[in-house]
Amino acid sequence: MATISLTAEELTDRELLDETGRDIGAIIDLYVDVEGRPHWLLVDTGFFPNYFSVIPVTDVVVSGRGLEVHYTMEKLTGAPNNMRGKDFAKHREGLLYDYYRLEAPASVAEATRHGANDKVLLPPSELCRFSTLSCENKPTEFNAE
């Protein structure tokens, strides 16, 4: 399995494909930690004007076709979303982790499953939006299949 490093800046405006190779939409913004590592993607699927699908960065795979997620378009359009220009609502973060069946940090009390804080994605309320805040632009690793 190859490892490819991409920064938040390199991810922004890239097209994302679903598991069938269908174009989902463009990565409009990201939630990044203080070191600039992306945790969540905000993707404009075009289905819901003024709303972005929120997708965990752990589910992104770099393939020969480009950036892919192992979900169908239908799964992603049903995911908890984020209104354009607004931060993700803290009270909805548990839904986000449960929808993608991810372990959440203890700070997300509403989530069903919790894991060690150093081994899980941070919730959007503990991150910054890449487009609006001055975050360092350090690479993060993606495992390509």
Image (spheres, helix red, strand yellow):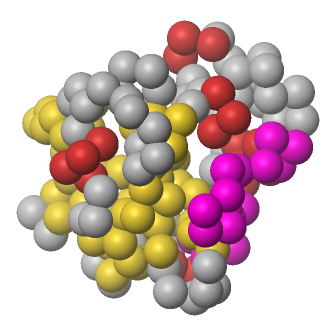
- Can you give x and y, in whole percent of width and height, for residue 66 in the image? 18, 64
Left or right, 144 with respect to 98, comes to left
Residue 76 falls within the magenta-colored stretch: yes
Q: Is residue 59 visible?
A: no
Count the marks: 0
Q: Quadrant of residue 134?
A: top left
Magenta segment boundaries in residue numbering: 75-92
Q: Quadrant of residue 112?
A: top right
Pick the residue in front: 28 or 140. 28
Left or right, 102 with respect to 136, comes to right
> Residue sitting at 25 percent across and 65 percent down?
14
> Residue sitting at 69 percent across and 35 percent down?
125
Q: Is residue 17 above or below residue 139?
A: below
Q: Is residue 78 above or below residue 105?
A: below
- Can you give x and y, in whole percent of width and height, for residue 3 in the image? 15, 33
> Residue sitting at 47 percent across and 66 percent down?
43
Q: Is residue 29 visible?
A: yes
Pick the residue in front: 40 or 58. 40
- Can you give x and y, in whole percent of width and height, for residue 15 in the image? 28, 71
Q: Is residue 67 above or below residue 129?
A: below
Left or right, 118 with respect to 90, comes to left
> Residue sitting at 38 percent across and 77 percent down?
25
Pick the residue in front: 97 or 6. 6
- Can you give x and y, in whole percent of width and height, for residue 39 in the image? 47, 37
Q: Is residue 16 above or below residue 40?
A: below
Quadrant where the image shows the N terminus: top left
Left or right, 79 with respect to 121, comes to right
